[in-house]
Image (cartoon, rainbow, N blue to C red):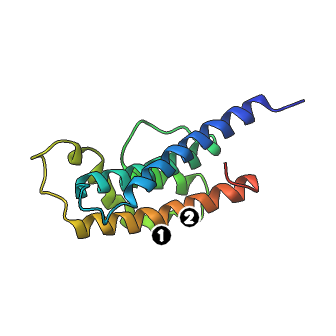
Amino acid sequence: MPDEHGDIIQQLAAQWVRWAHADMTVAALVDDERIAPEIIAFHAQQAVEKMLKALLVRRQVDFPRTHSIGALLAFCAEAGFGGAQEFTDASSLTRYAVATRYPGEEEPVTRQEAKDAVTLAAQVFVWSFTQLREIDGTAP
């Protein structure tokens, strides 16, 4: 008998991963001067947020609606994802979740800050993807 609940969980996690991948694709355009650094940094933050949420969904961990990377990493650590504590620097990405959507709210993001955000996001993305592979034997 198929595990319908498990299939639904896996499909939901896979959707989070697809969206995270789309965000990383945009963030990877960091050297394209036509794209504002704020947009790049926003998508880097979103990629991390969505990958962490994919991990939590896959482990069936309830979590609040939040953009806080630090909070999501803490939930991941509590859920037993080894290495989550190594990404505490990724908490700095949280500032790009909302402030970058509203001009004048914070100091503009520099191109170098956007590049740093993308580098950090890529590290968390790869780690998260690896964690999903360990759960399923393959990534969603």
Q: Is residue 101 visible?
A: yes
Q: Amino acid at mark 1?
A: Glu
Q: Quadrant of the N terminus?
A: top right
Circle 2/circle 1 CB separation < 8 Å: yes
**Residue at the far left in the pictured view:** 104
Which residue in the protein does label 2 denote? 127
Which residue in the protein does label 1 denote? 86
Query: Percent from the top left, x then y, of residue 23?
Result: 43, 50
Query: Percent from the top left, x then y, of residue 104?
Result: 9, 47
Query: Percent from the top left, x then y, of residue 21?
Result: 51, 51
Q: Amino acid at mark 2?
A: Trp
Helix, strand, or loop for circle 2? helix
Q: Which image quarter: residue 62?
A: top right
First in residue order: circle 2 vs circle 1: 1
Could you classify mark 1 by the number of other residues whose Cα lies within 10 Å: few (under 14), some (14-19), or many (20 or more)? few
Helix, strand, or loop for circle 1? helix
**Residue name at image x 28 percent, y 51 percent:** 39
Q: Is residue 132 above or below residue 62?
A: below
Q: Which mark is residue 65?
A: none
Q: CA distance from mark 2 to mark 1?
A: 10 Å
**Residue name at image x 13 percent, y 52 percent:** 106
Q: Is residue 124 left or right of residue 95?
A: right
**Residue name at image x 63 percent, y 62 percent:** 130
Nearer-the-camera pick, 74 or 122: 122
Q: Is residue 88 visible?
A: no
Q: Which image quarter: residue 109?
A: bottom left
Q: Which image quarter: residue 133?
A: bottom right
